Image: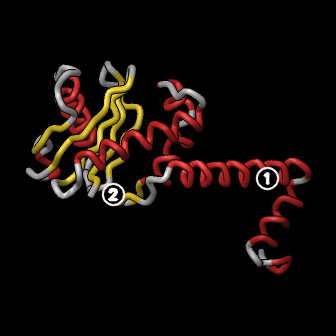
Amino acid sequence: MIKGIIIVNNHGKPRLAKFYQSVTSEEIQQSIIRRIFNQVASRPDSFCNYLEGSIPEWGSNTKLIYRHYATLYFVFAVDSQESDLGVLDLIQVFVEALDKCFENVCELDLIFHADRVHYVLDEIVMAGMVLETNINLILQSIDDQNKMHEKSKGALATTPQAGTETVRQQLGAGSNWA
């Protein structure tokens, strides 16, 4: 099971942090992010991308599996039952999906479009379990969501009441819904 996904830049600033295993307070979350960054950033790029038993809050069987792309570290904290190579492949799928969504993803995309980044991640991982690894299906789902978003914006732009009526009809509520 995936316990957390963290993206930090080379200076230790978190750009995405998603915890799937309970972390009680924001202070502990910040401590975990700092500890993960310190462990990952202190390793030379020539070392392997795996660390074991490094987060006490998540138990001794936690592994950190990460990739360093340009100015960002993509770190997945997983339990010992997860395949190291499988998680590395999952990181690659996540980065490729982001790259296709943002046309050459960079750190600024993660900052200014955090909602879209979370949506992409939610298409791949939900509640610590991998949902999808097929990049084409992930991109199709994201494209479908974008089309629905644009369609709803267009409906609301014509007249707000017509947009509300359209949503009511799509939900099957008709005009009796209030």
Looking at the image, the residue that sits furthest to the bottom is: 176
- Report which residue position mark 1 lands on: 151
Q: CA distance from mark 2 to mark 1?
A: 31 Å
Q: Which mark is residue 128?
A: 2
Above or below — where is 172 with respect to 18? Answer: below
- Residue 73: name its quadrant: top left
- Please state the horizontal and vertical placement of residue 114, each as a whole percent of the image: 52, 38
- Please state the horizontal and vertical placement of residue 110, each as a whole percent of the image: 49, 32
Q: Is residue 160 left or right of residue 102?
A: right
Q: Which mark is residue 12?
A: none
Q: Callout 1, which amino acid?
A: Lys
- Please state the horizontal and vertical placement of residue 27, each as a whole percent of the image: 25, 39
Q: Nearer the viewer, residue 92 or 76?
A: 92
Residue shown at the point (25%, 52%) measured from the top left: 24
Above or below — where is 120 with respect to 13? Answer: below
Above or below — where is 44 with respect to 149? Answer: above
Above or below — where is 15 with respect to 87? Answer: above
